[in-house]
Amino acid sequence: MPIRILVVEDEADIARLIKRTLERAGDMRVDIVDRGDDALDAVLPNPPDLIVLDINLPAVNGFEICRLLRAKPVTASVPVIMLTARGAESDRVSGLDLGADDYITKPFSVRELAARVRAVLRRRPAGAVSPAPYRSAHLVADFDAVAVTVDGTPVRLTRTEFELLRCLVESRNRVLSRGRLLERVWGQDGTTATRSIDVHIARLRSKLCAAGDQIETLVGLGYRFVDLPGTDGDGPA
């Protein structure tokens, strides 16, 4: 089955350009809507594999769409790439805080957009062995079941946040540079701003509540996930 992409864009020429670019390889099918309310109507009954989302839209803006999608279990993990003319840092941070997996400003390169779409969609290599559930005093992360709980309460993470946590846990007690996180989580080398990584880390810490203290910042070096007293040793080495 082809990968299903929904492009939410009210500029018809841009939407058609994105559609042609993504469908060129033959493994993606792109649908287009030009209004925010139509986007919600299209997504909720049958969520796509990824959404390319403008912000300035008729009826419902992209920020609100992203917030609503992340609030619903059926769409909480659908990847969202915001593609917009709003390039201010405050807009970028707002988009990432709401759960966007990436944020691209116009004017943009269609080749870079296609690369970022594939990076977000990229799965782990076939045949990879899932690690055993990680358990600490507050956190249980079952990467095979895609389930994370803190003090027994389920935590809803975006796909990027989940992969970021997986990467940190699998390399626990070791420092990971921002460049290494870019490579392992985003599948990119320098095309995602380090500010984006910092925002995702901050949001992940917030969602993990008491377990968020296990993610340490090492100024000038990167991040490290550390074991705290109470870890039972079942996590991945």
Image: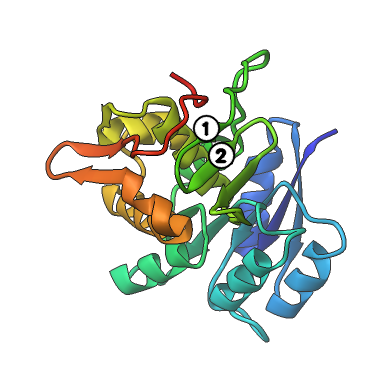
Q: Which amino acid does label 1 sit on?
A: Tyr
**The C terminus lies in which quarter of the figure?**
top left
Local secondary structure at mark 2:
strand
The spot of residue 143 in percent (x, y) is: 61, 33
The spot of residue 204 in percent (x, y) is: 43, 54
Query: For this view, does 137 lie left or right of residue 51?
Result: left
Q: Return the residue found at the far bottom.
A: 59
Q: What residue type is labelled 2?
A: Ala
Q: Residue 134 has which mark?
A: 1
Mark 1 or mark 2: whose residue is earlier in sequence:
1
Local secondary structure at mark 1:
strand
Residue nearer the viewer, 204 or 211: 211
**As displayed, is residue 95 above or below residue 136?**
below
Q: Which residue matches tag 2? A: 141
Res. 107 image quadrant: bottom left
Residue nearer the viewer, 118 or 142: 142
Q: How crowded is mark 1: few (under 14 residues within 10 Å), some or many (20 or more)?
A: many
User: Disc 1 versus disc 2: distance between alpha carbons?
Assistant: 5 Å
Residue at 54 percent across and 54 percent down: it is: 151
Q: Return the residue found at the far left.
A: 220
The spot of residue 39 in percent (x, y) is: 74, 70
Is the Cβ of the residue at disc 1 closer than 8 Å to that at disc 2?
yes
Q: How crowded is mark 2: few (under 14 residues within 10 Å), some or many (20 or more)?
A: many
